[in-house]
Image (cartoon, helix red, strand yellow):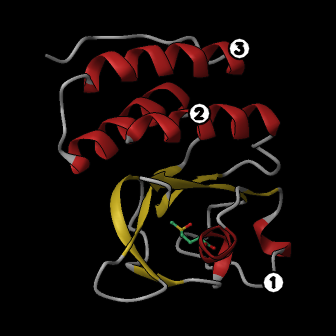
Amino acid sequence: MAETFFIDASDKAAAYQELGRVYGSVIDGEDNEIARLATLVCLLKTTFGARFFWCGFYLCDPNKEDELVIGPYQGTMGCLRIPFGKGVCGKAAREAKTQIVDDVHAFADHIACDANSNSEIVVPIFKNGKLFGVLDIDSTEFSAFDNDDRIGLEALCAQVF
Ligand code: SME
């Protein structure tokens, strides 16, 4: 059963901790992948909506090697597919490593799905030790993401499966 929640986003580190608690309780007993992914996107966007202009998953396509396909997201329309190695998402997938980009316009390979995005963080997500996809978050602010976001988002992504 869903619970109502309000998380104060002004203390980021504390907010991520509380998000982990709420997320764990909401998805407890739910084994559907989309339900687990979509719920995390909802909690993040609801909590950090002012800073998170676009928030969602790109998932490894089981039918196409080294290609990501759009998953659950909230925001303006995202591009549907991203090859591994292309853009910030493709780099995170290829390297299986979180990427923080302070100014997407200075990132040579950036894929501009929406011209309003100015900075971005992309966090890989794993299932049974294998790359499952990436969590992509864009902000209209420059330099919106830091190490607190990396730690908080990596911990939340580790809770999904
Ligand atoms: N900017 C991303 C593409 C996805 S959109 O931001 C939703 C990238 O360069 O990988």
Q: Secondary structure at mark 1?
A: loop
- Residue beneath disc 2: 155
Say which residue appears at 31% left-offset and 15% top-offset: 25
Crowding near the residue tagged with mark 1, few <14, some 14–19, many ≥20 C-alpha atoms within 10 Å: few
Q: Quadrant of the N terminus?
A: top left
Q: Secondary structure at mark 3?
A: loop
Q: Amino acid at mark 3?
A: Asp
Q: Which sits earlier in the primary sequence, circle 1 or circle 3?
A: 3
Residue 89, by quadrant, is: bottom right
Mark number displayed over residue 108: 1
Question: In the displayed structure, does residue 64 sit left or right of residue 103?
Answer: left
- Residue beneath disc 3: 11
The tally of labels here is 3
Residue at the extreme front: 128
Please, is residue 112 above or below residue 53 in the view? below
Residue 51 visible within the image? no
Q: Amino acid at mark 1?
A: Ala
Please, is residue 69 above or below residue 136 in the view? below
Of badges 2 and 3, the one in the foreground is 2
Q: Nearer the viewer, residue 118 or 120?
A: 120
Q: Amino acid at mark 2?
A: Ala
Crowding near the residue tagged with mark 2, few <14, some 14–19, many ≥20 C-alpha atoms within 10 Å: some
